[in-house]
Amino acid sequence: MFEDAVVSLLIFIIVYLFIILEKHHRAVITMLGGSAALFLVFKDPIEALVRYVDFNTIFLLIGMMIFVSVTKRSGLFHFLGLYSIKLSRGSVFFFFVSINFLVALLSSFLDNVTTILVFVPVTLVVCDTVDLDPVPFVISEIISSNIGGTATMIGDPPNIMIASAAKLHFLDFVVNVAPAAVLTLIVTLIFLSAVYRRVIFRKIPVEVVEGFDPRRAIVDKKLFYLSIILTLVVLVLFSLQKPLGLESFEVALLAGFLSLAFLNKKDIEDVFKEIEWGVIFFFIGLFLVVGALEEAGVLEKISELVIRLSKGKMEGTLISILGISGLSSAFVDNIPFTATMIPVIKKLAVLAPETFSDLRPLWWALSLGACLGGNGTLIGASANVVGTSLIADRKHITFWEYFKIGFPVLILSLLVSGVYLLIRY
């Protein structure tokens, strides 16, 4: 086990080092790391693929990439972009704030990746139309989607896992976690507005805005109205996932291939070529690299550190769980980390029943840390990788470029959440 821990940690460090240095394509780096883990760490490679590769995420990405590609052909995104500029009356700041709040709101009910796949194309159209740098908007939307996903039980997978393990309900998260998420979003948008002030505090000339006619953006009327109907159906199905017993990938694949049914053969082939296969393989490799850490018990050791740091006190435990969950989730997938932390928190009630008779504050600390931690690095959350890949043909956002924005946002988020937890609990 010790040898496996050393090997898995070495693979993880090498993979991250090469990603940071950007000496090769990220997908190739993670797939080489994942392949090395299959050879050197996992006893049963087939079982490792089934256990650690999140195929729900993989097929969700494929389905939504297809759906977004088809929808883009109808002109719907261009229409929405021009219409949003009309509503903003030329205020870039108003557009920036409103679209980020909308992204956060939808991400609290839908998958973060889905929200990013829908909103980033709209944002790119707006920025192209009025000659704005799209980077501040895309990065802020990625961050807002991760913050929004923290607010509800269904917004992010760690919350679903926590709710199941602790027998918590939807309203429990709305009452206890959503206020922290809203405060974090407000503080974050203030910070981002200051960082990107040269882009955001601009005014688009009124004559330019008045000259926009959103109806001209419609390329194919039949496909346009079909895309609207399918988008509404997808939003409803995602919202009703739990009562209907549906997985995210089922909804995404249905939407993707149903939309393809209305295209001709040539257009279908073009859509398949537009799927970001590099992103897909990047995730598969990353799931295996992080899975190797879990398999070798490295994540469990991180969890045990929480108990030592807390010294058996509720306040110390809250901050330890929040801080370690947040910092760890910036570098490793928050799903296996949350799965590892759940039994650790349950153990506290047994080891110190007087101090930890009510574990709910600790569950909120884990939720906030694990979900908000994804903003810390470029590969901290699925939405980060997908969002930056959608803008890659205009601007290549490096690991360090994102880190300079994302990590300060993470620290701010943890500070806001820590103060919130200590005051409230």
Image (cartoon, rainbow, N blue to C red):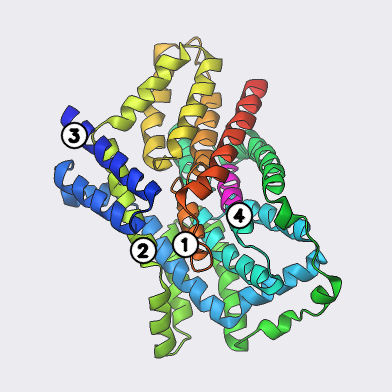
Give me the residue at 72% from left, 54% from top.
198
Give the residues drawn in magenta, as a range: 140-151
- Give, as a three-letter code, the residue at label 2: Gly
CB of mark 4 within 8 Å of CB of mark 2?
no
As helix, strand or loop, the secondary structure at mark 2 comes to helix
**Residue at point 48%, 85% (across, down):** 262
Q: Position of residue 22 (x, y in %)?
A: 38, 53
Pick whichever of labels 1 and 2 is earlier in the sequence.
Answer: 2
Report the Cα–Cα distance between label 3 and label 2: 28 Å
Give the alpha-carbon distance from disc 1 to disc 4, as whole Å: 14 Å
Badge 2 density bin: few <14, some 14–19, many ≥20, Cα 10 Å: few
Residue at the image position 46 percent from the left and 86 percent from the top: 263
76 shown above or below 315: below
N-terminal of the two: label 4 or label 2? 4
State which tag comes first along the sequence, 1 or 3: 3
Q: Position of residue 57 (x, y in %)?
A: 40, 56
Q: Which mark is residue 278?
A: 2
Mark 1 or 3, which is nearer the eye?
Answer: 1
Give neighbour class at mark 3: few <14, some 14-19, many 20+ (Cα, 10 Å).
some
| In the image, residue 270 above or below residue 311 | below
Query: Quick one: SS at disc 4?
Result: helix
Q: Earlier in the sequence, mark 1 or mark 4?
A: 4
Determine if the magenta segment contains residue 148. yes
Relative to 280, is 233 on the left or the right?
right
Between residue 43 and residue 26, name the one nearer to us. 26
Query: On the image, numbered disc 4 is attached to which residue?
Result: 141
The residue pinned by badge 3 equals 4
Q: Quadrant of residue 421?
A: top right
Distance from label 1 to label 3 (Cα)? 33 Å
| Residue kind at label 3, given as amino acid type | Asp
Which labelled disc corresponds to residue 389?
A: 1
